[in-house]
Amino acid sequence: MNLNITEMSACQLKDFSRRYILSLTLEELQTVRDHFKEKGRQPTRLELECIAQTWSEHCNHKTMTGRVEYTENGNTKTYGNLLKETVFKPLESMDTGHCLSVFKDNAGIIKFTPGWGIAMKAETHNHPSAIEPYGGAATGVGGVIRDILGAGLGAKPVMNIDVFCFGDLDTPHSEIPEGVLHPRRVFRGVVKGVRDYSNRMGIPTSSGAIIFDEKYLYNPLVYCGTIGVIPEKCVDKQVVEGDIILAVGGKTGKDGLHGATFSSVGLDGCADSGCVQIGDPITEKQFADILLKLRDENLYNAVTDCGAGGFSSAVGEMGRETGAVVNLEKVTLKQKDMEPWEIFLSESQERMVLSVPGEKIERVRYLLESEDVGFAEIGKFGGGKLKVYYEDKLECELDMDFLHGGYPRTVRTALWTDKESEDIFVKETGPADVLMKIFSDPNNASKEKVIRQYDHEVQGSSVIRPLEGMDQDMPQDGCVIRPLNGSSAGIAVGLGINPFYGIQDPFRMAATVAEEAVRNAVSCGGDIRRAGLMDNFCWGDTEDPEILGELVRACQGCGDASGILKIPFISGKDSLNNFYSTPSAEKMNIPGTLLVTCVAPVENVEKACRSSFTGPGNLIYLAGETLCELGYSALSRSGFCSGGEVPALRKEISQGVLEFIRKCIERGLLRSCHDLSEGGLALAFAEMCFSGTGAEIDISAFDLKGRSGCGEMWAKLFSESNSRFLIEVSPGNAAEAEALADIPLISIGRTTENGLLQVSDGAKTVIKSPADRFKKVYTEALKW
Amino acid sequence: MRVAVEVYRRGNCLEGRELSREIEELGIEEKYSVSVSKIYVIELDEDSVPGNSDERIKRIAGEILIDPVVEKYSVGIRSMEGVSVEVYFKKGVLDIAGRRAAEAAELAGLGEGLISVSSGDRYVISGSVCDMEKCRYISEKLFYNKVIQQATCR
């Protein structure tokens, strides 16, 4: 079907784009129109859909890789490529010898043990999960697992990560608009979706986080990540001209049409079933297993997953250098009444595309048939163009240069003005009551009810599980797995996310969450000298210069943190346009939210360190410096203080503290280690006591750095300054640990056997209570 | 022939208890209890089924659709007190459970004459005041997602 667009006016083009859900800007539509005018013909529906998908924000990341004119406090700077000039910038001067694949494939890859690499990828599935939480979250997991299967020549998925942001669970039903699901329903559906897909795939879900805030009411966020292991020799792939295009896995149906373009615009409460994909983990498990066998027999030259945009995206990307000829009638379909463009763009799940040399196709067919895995030879790579036929009729003939590089480069405007922080004010009340209130906030409460639904034992590789301690219910900073049989090497994973800091300063937020991810990885034994970071930005309407300004600040913060920490970002994904248009055309944006994941090898998992006190009689040290940084802290969000600054990342101390912890764990000096983040010293100390061991600390043992602006006790207990850890050291190791420290390291207390949580400030007792009292609130606060 | 098979728990229905709690969370004052079951609609070509079709349905239900330790089945929808809400996927939405049930029947040698299996969910709401409008509201809020599913209340 040809569409008559070459004579359309701007108005008609806009209307046309809306009608066909192309999500293209006017400038892009005009470029397409002029291209076909020059060709002297009208485009087909398939060609237009293919261009719209390839140029979509979801697939092309036009904002993050585009030009931005950024004005900060009146000074203007132009970025030619925002990501390259901020997040990637430190790569230019950094030692990246341990990185095997950086932002060029389905996943980033770093070195693991000799001959092996670690592949890492995190995605978001926000729009689908807002509309159908169970299916949206499940297919988010399925999609990111396929990203790992499609990294290099295929990595084996060994761990899943899931992070969610939901609206306030207590939102009255009467306040939920038509077309929006209640946060509690989204929460339950998303968790069930992740559980069912991950568990059925036999992949442990070992790491995650959940944030609750009313601003996620309309647009919940669902981050899904997967870690894989890959032989180093399989890191590179190359499609060869003449290779057969082999579609493997599930059949193609009408489900998930327009996913890429739909995810590139805001939500408005109107969606149809075509936007929703339904996951089938059994099909994915079948081909995941056989794919690795095909890889080991060297039976294909390249592989990628069919994600957003379906064959259009997979074949279009793979054939970028060679071109491709596709025969759509050969695709195995779920239903008969499908148009050619629907077959090419369908986002039916559980499909991958392989580039198979002709001489190896027999063996590939045999192996796939032997495992009852569906496949279809749908064309060949080569010819320089993207040509798509349906029953001998040419439905698409596009130049690869135009498809991948023909979109107009627009300059976006971004604005940022520093926000003055207000003077800090603390409501004087009992610190024990404050701590109790902080634990009762679902953001800080135990997520055990969710974690227990996930299988984190499958594959038998878990070393540090999400919950540890005497009762197996104490949250850990990070997790460690040991994925290779016969090897003691492990992988440590740490996460960082805190959208609240971004309200005051997205730069500091980004730098802080990056360090938090690293702190979480190093505190359980990760070798951060060989680590890699992943960024996942979820932002609102970036057409708004102020919102784009916040995104620029966050990108700058990531770049700054990467330089300070000397750890590169090697993979990432952004999800923009997370806003909801109300019937009165008001745009409800999410708060700019950045998830940073740190993945680090662990040389010997036997040295991995946990986050809960291990027994009485040990010394407790505070490593790092405490400043009064209470802005948007847990204390502030619990209503006990206002004003103040959010934490900054300090170059002069950060690396020193992280390196100190790494060395201590490497030498086996620590009994336990917990980083200080939300809730500061008080919350970390209480969590460490939940293991059943009591402890006492004296906060007069250390000084606050700089001015407090409020009672010193409050800042010492609840400040959320970066680069700090609480460590438990046995008396026999204390001297060696102290000798290693070229950073502030203060002995502030000891562990006891009375089960009491005691905090004193010199002679004054600040908190004295059974730790179980806090634990009860902590474990019961989140109502599932 | 098209036959509905209902699969239900032998003992207490945990999911039903959770849903009763969720009804309370909706702000509805009346107490309701909810019973949850699964429905499979089996379509057979009677002429192609060797032997007795009813027997075939029973074998598919007993050998494929239930876990005999914890579940039972009835051929046909059980008669129960209260408002019955049946939820099915809309046309074109992938029905994994139905598809897998049909594949399993095939593998078990029960596929001859089997045209299709489609799956659905049944919720029976009972309580002192069982108002149809209220049950429709509850269904929409808790039992199904109208983007991909459709429901009938009776």
Image: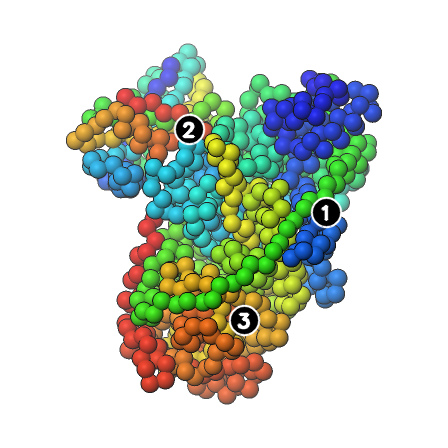
Q: Secondary structure at mark 2?
A: loop
Query: Residue at the location (43% across, 36% down)?
Result: A180
The residue at which mark 1 appears reads as A67
x, y percent for residue A741: 56, 82
State left or right for residue B72 relative to residue A563.
left
Mark 1, other Cα within 10 Å: few <14 / some 14–19 / many ≥20:
some
Circle 3 chain: A
Q: Are marks 2 and 3 on the same chain?
A: no
Q: Secondary structure at mark 1?
A: strand
Question: Mark 1 to mark 2: distance in Å?
Answer: 41 Å
Query: Residue at the location (32% across, 50% down)?
Result: A783
Q: Quadrant of residue A615?
A: bottom left
Which quarter shows the N terminus of chain A? top right
Report if the CB atoms under discs 1 and 2 are less than 8 Å apart.
no
Nearest the viewer among A73 and A224 is A73
Tell me if I can see residue A174 in this picture.
Answer: yes
Report if the CB atoms under discs 1 and 3 are less than 8 Å apart.
no
